[in-house]
């Protein structure tokens, strides 16, 4: 299979390195801090936001999860396996998974809102530095980690199955897996 997930993750990490070099150490560390702060500030409000998103997302998640998940565990939910246990594809197990998916989608929406607001007020200044490469690498790895942590629950159905298959064949996913699982453990109490 074509290693599209590895290319995507490598692209995100390279994006972080290049922007880190162009922006400099200080700006890149600020961006990394804003990314982490966006997650931490959004966590308590995810379930409240999910109430407003649920009417539109419930049918989509219901349809896609019902078609995609076998009974028991699923490779689609790999980083979430310890947090979510599916008893069956119908009934309370699937409803809990749908609620978790909607909460994670609300978390992603709130994080994106904070990140966009920050970008609107950020001053654009180019100050290339070699130290920015390391900070940019950290920013790229953090962005890839958030992608791997949030995507399995937010993209059910055919895309989710494709993501699970690509993650199983990926070379970069096992390297990031401990950090992804740690992030899932941090997020889980707020969205499950």
Image: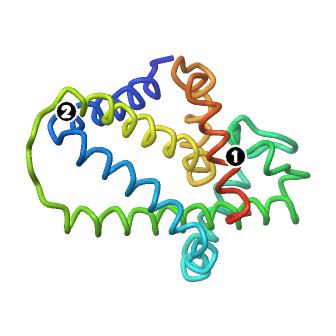
Say which mark, if any, is on residue 27.
none
Badge 2 vs badge 1, beta-carbon distance below 8 Å: no
Q: Among all residues in the image, which is located at the extreme left?
A: 126
Q: Mark 1 points at which residue?
A: 68
What's the residue at 54%, 40% (across, down)? 148
Crowdedness near tag 1: few (<14), some (14–19) or many (≥20) residues, C-alpha within 10 Å: some
Q: Name the residue under label 2.
A: 21
Q: Position of residue 35 (x, y in %)?
A: 41, 54
Coloration of the structure image? rainbow
What's the residue at 43%, 26% (across, down)? 4
Quadrant, the C terminus: bottom right
Q: Where is residue 27 in the image (x, y as percent from the top left)?
A: 23, 48
Q: Where is residue 153 in the image (x, y as percent from the top left)?
A: 63, 52
Crowdedness near tag 2: few (<14), some (14–19) or many (≥20) residues, C-alpha within 10 Å: many
Drawn side of residue 140 relative to residue 154, left or right = left
**Which element carries disc 1, helix, strand or loop?**
helix
**Which element carries disc 2, helix, strand or loop?**
helix
Drawn side of residue 20 relative to residue 187, left or right = left
Q: Which of marks 2 and 1 is in front?
A: 2
Closer to the camera, 108 or 36? 36
Residue 183 vs 128, above or below: the answer is below
Give the mark nearest the N terminus, 2 or 1.
2
């Amino acid at each position: 299979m074509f290693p599209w997930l590895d290319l995507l993750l490598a692209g995100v990490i390279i994006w972080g390195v290049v922007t880190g070099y162009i922006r400099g150490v200080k700006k890149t560390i600020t961006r990394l801090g804003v990314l982490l702060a966006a997650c931490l500030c959004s966590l308590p409000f995810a379930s409240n936001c999910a109430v407003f998103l649920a009417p539109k997302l419930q049918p989509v998640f219901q349809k896609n999860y019902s078609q995609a998940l076998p009974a028991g565990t699923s490779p689609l939910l790999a980083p979430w396996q310890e947090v979510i246990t599916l008893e069956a594809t119908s009934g309370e197990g699937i409803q809990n998974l749908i609620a978790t998916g909607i909460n994670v989608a609300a978390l992603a929406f709130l994080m994106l809102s904070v990140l966009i607001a920050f970008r609107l007020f950020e001053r654009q200044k180019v100050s290339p530095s070699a130290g920015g490469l390391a900070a940019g690498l950290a920013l790229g790895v953090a962005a890839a980690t958030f992608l791997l942590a949030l995507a399995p629950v937010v993209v059910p159905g055919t895309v989710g199955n494709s993501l699970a298959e690509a993650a199983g064949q990926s070379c970069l996913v096992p390297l990031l897996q401990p950090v992804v699982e740690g992030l899932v453990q941090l997020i889980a109490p707020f969205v499950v």
